[in-house]
Image: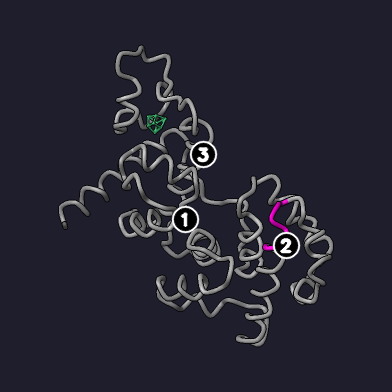
């Protein structure tokens, strides 16, 4: 077991290094750093594109510039403001429910108390909000608090399955919790962001561009895809 854990850590280090050679080590991302605003943003990001999430968030901020104003929003008006991001009714409910609970429990709109909590407890607290799953919680913990949380979205899940880093039956949450302890110190953010970029640009859902992939040498699925083909073309 310890050997398997060491091997997984080593593979993740190797993958991270190869991606950093291609893409560098991104240190920032578009996410808000204020934890409560980040929570709102990550709720808006569910089941939509980054572009539509950002449009929904921009409209929300324009209409409700402060957190107290947002918390006091009428559900139907908030839904209207964020409609472009999809699932507006559910997201408006999650946002208003989360703000009301934070206000009630903390006496204001702050999640700073999470900073001093162990990661599993902080995650458990966040995932106790309706509409907040492990991915959303991990994004917030990583980008707002700098905790070593590892968010797994659909791109990261697809790539790590193809690399054989997680079982083929893994869900987003299971893969995140499985990989997280094995990602190197300081690598959670860069590896997360670089895997997303690889998943968008190269390891696409259909017709991954294995011949152009910086991970081809360490990818079992890439090797299968390339069998009998030249280095120029790859398709599933
Ligand atoms: S080699 Fe192919 S399957 Fe493997 S990570 Fe790269 S693009 Fe994806």
Residue 89 rendering spot, x and y as whole percentages:
72, 62
| Gap in angstroms between the C-alphas marked 3 and 1 | 14 Å
Taking the image in four quarters, ligand 1 sits in the one at top left
- Predominant SS of the magenta segment: helix
Identity of the residue drawn at 28% across and 43% down:
11
Identity of the residue drawn at 61% across and 63% down:
33
Q: Is residue 31 left or right of residue 14?
A: right
Residue 86 covered by magenta stretch: yes
Identity of the residue drawn at 51% across and 46% down:
26
Residue 196 covered by magenta stretch: no
Q: Are marks 3 and 1 in contact (CB under 8 Å)?
A: no
Where residue 87 sits, quadrant-wise, is bottom right
- Compared with 212, 164 (above or below) is below
| Gap in angstroms between the C-alphas marked 2 and 1 | 25 Å
Quarter of the image with the N terminus in it = bottom left
Q: Nearer the viewer, residue 153 or 38?
A: 153
The first of marks 2 and 1 along the sequence is 2
Quarter of the image with the C terminus in it = top left
- The colouring scheme, among rainbow, by chain, secondary structure or one colour, is one colour
Count how many numbered circles sit on residues in the image: 3
- Residue annotated with mark 1: 151
- Residue annotated with mark 3: 197
Q: Say which mark, if any, is on residue 89.
A: 2
Q: Nearer the viewer, residue 120 or 115?
A: 120
| Gap in angstroms between the C-alphas marked 3 and 2 | 30 Å
Magenta residues, start to end: 85-90
- Compared with 167, 215 (above or below) is above
Q: Nearer the viewer, mark 3 or mark 2?
A: 2
């Amino acid at each position: 077991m310890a050997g398997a854990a060491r091997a997984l850590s080593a593979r993740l280090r190797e993958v991270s290094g190869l991606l950093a050679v291609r893409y560098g080590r991104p240190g920032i991302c578009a996410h808000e750093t204020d934890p409560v605003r980040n929570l709102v943003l990550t709720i808006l990001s569910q089941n939509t594109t980054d572009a539509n999430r950002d449009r929904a968030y921009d409209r929300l901020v324009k209409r409700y510039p402060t957190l107290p104003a947002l918390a006091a929003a009428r559900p139907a008006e908030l839904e209207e403001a964020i409609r472009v991001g999809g699932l507006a009714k559910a997201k408006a409910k999650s946002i208003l429910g989360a703000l009301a609970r934070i206000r009630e429990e903390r006496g204001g709109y702050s999640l700073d108390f999470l900073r001093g909590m162990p990661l599993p407890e902080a995650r458990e607290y966040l995932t106790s909000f309706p509409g907040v799953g492990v991915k959303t919680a991990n994004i917030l913990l990583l980008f707002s608090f700098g905790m070593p949380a590892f968010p797994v979205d659909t791109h990261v899940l697809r790539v790590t399955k193809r690399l054989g880093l997680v079982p083929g039956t893994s869900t987003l949450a299971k893969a995140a919790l499985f990989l997280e302890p094995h990602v190197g110190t300081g690598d959670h953010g860069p590896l997360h962001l670089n895997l997303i970029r690889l998943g968008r640009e190269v390891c696409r859902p259909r017709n991954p561009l294995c011949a152009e992939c910086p991970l081809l040498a360490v990818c079992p699925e890439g090797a299968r895809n390339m069998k009998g083909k030249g280095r120029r073309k790859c398709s599933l």
